[in-house]
Image: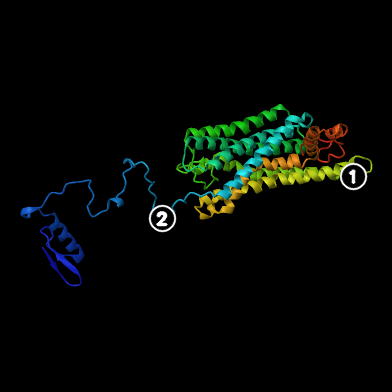
């Protein structure tokens, strides 16, 4: 029995408890409506049956999806309310593609020129230039794979997308390892003064080729390589954005080694430069009794500049890909900025061209031999009598080769500059 009282309260008396109980009026109306809705025909109450069918008033879109229910193919992954929506694919314009393709071609030509100079002139083969040869091979493969990726401008995951992504992942990661291998070799030989043999070179091969190969095989086997919407690339394929652990694989397939190189290269080259400066200062004390001391000063200046430029150029080229990677993690629309896209594309593809500029065009002895070979081929075709002067050009005066001093007077490593 229910009776209403004042102040919005009702009083209920039951058989078990004859004392009046105060309950809210809203509760009474709610209970009354529920009882009326549950009555059947004839005034009898229907027995409620457990049912998995939701109330018709609840929209189906708001129902929780069973973890065992199959999602229709092509359906978008349900996202938690409040999370930012993924960025749309970055559109690659024709001018941007042309700039990156040009960078790929120049990098491939530069890497090929480094390989060619190593094969043509055996007397210039030193251990540092041998390491530079392997770095050039990695950069050459990287430039070719990036060229195909930018040319295709993939819009989905396909077999050639996976193949191109695997080749670029392997070559790009290997380039990081060989770049650090050159710096480690310079540090061990110059600063530590430790003798290096085939053992250290074997370790470099195992790490610089083996680790990238193992990472690439694992990424392909686990189907982590694929279309990435050009938000962390410039047309080519890398880590598939549909992978739930894509950030982990982005780090493993390049970013963690790239960031490690940002720290390792400046530290090693600063230590090398400090050691060379100390040695040069000690050499200046003996200038009155060493007639060859002034001849070493121009080369030392050139070597110092190169030791500074090597990590600086590497960071300038690679930093843009790291910037876009961070912007992608932050879901920032700035990742699609055209300037960043072009800088990212050129930085990832021009490493071979930068190495060619430093170690071929800016190295006097290599530059002299290269120009001599070009001039000799041209004069032979024209028929001019330059035979007598060609021999002197093929063997330049050591005093003029300020970039490469005599290996007998300096450490063999220093001839690499």
Q: Furthest-right residue in view?
A: 289
Which of the 4 image quadrants contains residue 387?
Answer: top right
Instruction: Looking at the picture, tell me which residue is in the foreground, 382 or 15.
Output: 382
In the rendered view, would you say 338 is above or below 215? below
Q: Furthest-left residue in view?
A: 42
- Residue at (13, 49) in percent of width and height: 47
Q: Position of residue 361 (x, y in %)?
A: 75, 41
Which of the 4 image quadrants contains residue 36?
Answer: bottom left
Please identify the quadrant where the C terminus is shown. top right
The mark tally for this picture is 2
Q: Furthest-bottom residue in view?
A: 6
Give the structural element (helix, strand or loop) at label 1.
loop
Indicate left or right for 133 with 407 as reference. Answer: left
Query: Residue 363 bears which disc, if any?
Result: none
In the rendered view, would you say 44 is above or below 306? below
Q: CA distance from mark 2 to mark 1?
A: 70 Å
Q: Furthest-front residue in view?
A: 382
Q: Position of residue 151 (x, y in %)?
A: 55, 41
- Circle 1 residue: 285
- Residue at (87, 42) in percent of width and height: 283
Indicate left or right for 181 with 398 as reference. Answer: left
Question: For mark 1, does the 10 Å Cα neighbourhood hold few (<14), some (14 to 19), or many (20 or more) residues?
Answer: few
Q: Cβ–Cβ below 8 Å for labels 2 and 1? A: no
Please identify the quadrant where the N terminus is shown. bottom left
Instruction: Looking at the picture, tell me which residue is in the foreground, 195 or 176.
Output: 176
- Circle 2 residue: 82
Q: Position of residue 305 (x, y in %)?
A: 77, 46
Give the structural element (helix, strand or loop) at label 2.
loop
Res 212 seen here: yes
- Residue at (16, 70) in percent of width and height: 5
Indicate left or right for 14 with 134 as reference. Answer: left
């Amino acid at each position: 029995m229910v009776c209403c009282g004042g102040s919005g309260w009702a009083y209920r008396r039951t058989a078990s408890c004859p004392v009046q109980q105060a309950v809210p009026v809203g509760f009474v109306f709610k209970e009354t409506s529920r009882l009326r809705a549950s009555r059947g025909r004839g005034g009898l109450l229907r027995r409620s049956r457990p049912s998995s069918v939701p109330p018709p008033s609840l929209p189906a879109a708001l129902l929780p999806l069973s973890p065992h229910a199959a999602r229709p193919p092509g359906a978008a992954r349900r996202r938690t309310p409040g999370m930012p929506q993924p960025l749309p694919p970055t559109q690659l314009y024709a001018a941007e593609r042309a700039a990156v393709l040009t960078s790929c071609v120049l990098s491939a030509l530069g890497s090929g020129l480094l390989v060619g100079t190593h094969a043509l002139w055996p007397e210039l083969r030193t251990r540092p230039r041998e390491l530079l040869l392997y770095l050039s091979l990695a950069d050459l493969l990287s430039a070719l794979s990036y060229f195909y990726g930018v040319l295709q401008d993939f819009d989905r995951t396909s077999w050639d997308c996976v193949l191109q992504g695997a080749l670029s992942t392997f070559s790009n990661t290997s380039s990081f390892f060989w770049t650090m291998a050159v710096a480690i070799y310079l540090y061990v030989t110059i600063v530590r003064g430790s003798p290096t043999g085939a053992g250290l070179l074997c370790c470099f091969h195992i790490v610089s080729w083996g680790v990238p190969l193992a990472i690439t095989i694992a990424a392909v086997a686990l189907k982590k390589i694929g279309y990435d919407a050009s938000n962390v690339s410039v047309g080519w394929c890398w880590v598939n954005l549909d992978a739930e652990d894509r950030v982990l694989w982005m780090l493993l397939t390049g970013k963690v080694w790239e960031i490690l190189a940002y720290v390792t290269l400046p530290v090693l080259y600063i230590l090398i430069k400090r050691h060379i400066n100390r040695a040069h200062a000690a050499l200046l004390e003996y200038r009155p009794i060493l007639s060859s001391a002034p001849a070493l000063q121009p080369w030392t200046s050139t070597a110092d500049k190169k030791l500074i430029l090597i990590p600086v150029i590497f960071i300038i080229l690679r930093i843009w890909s790291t910037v876009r990677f961070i912007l992608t993690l932050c879901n920032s629309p700035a990742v699609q900025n055209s300037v960043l896209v072009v800088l990212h594309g050129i930085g990832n593809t021009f490493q071979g061209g930068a190495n060619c500029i430093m170690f071929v065009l800016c190295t006097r002895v290599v530059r002299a031999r290269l120009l001599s070979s070009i001039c000799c081929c041209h004069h032979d075709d024209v028929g001019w009598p330059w035979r007598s002067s060609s021999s002197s050009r093929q063997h330049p005066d050591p005093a003029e080769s300020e970039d490469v001093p005599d290996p007998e007077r300096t450490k063999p490593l220093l001839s690499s500059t």
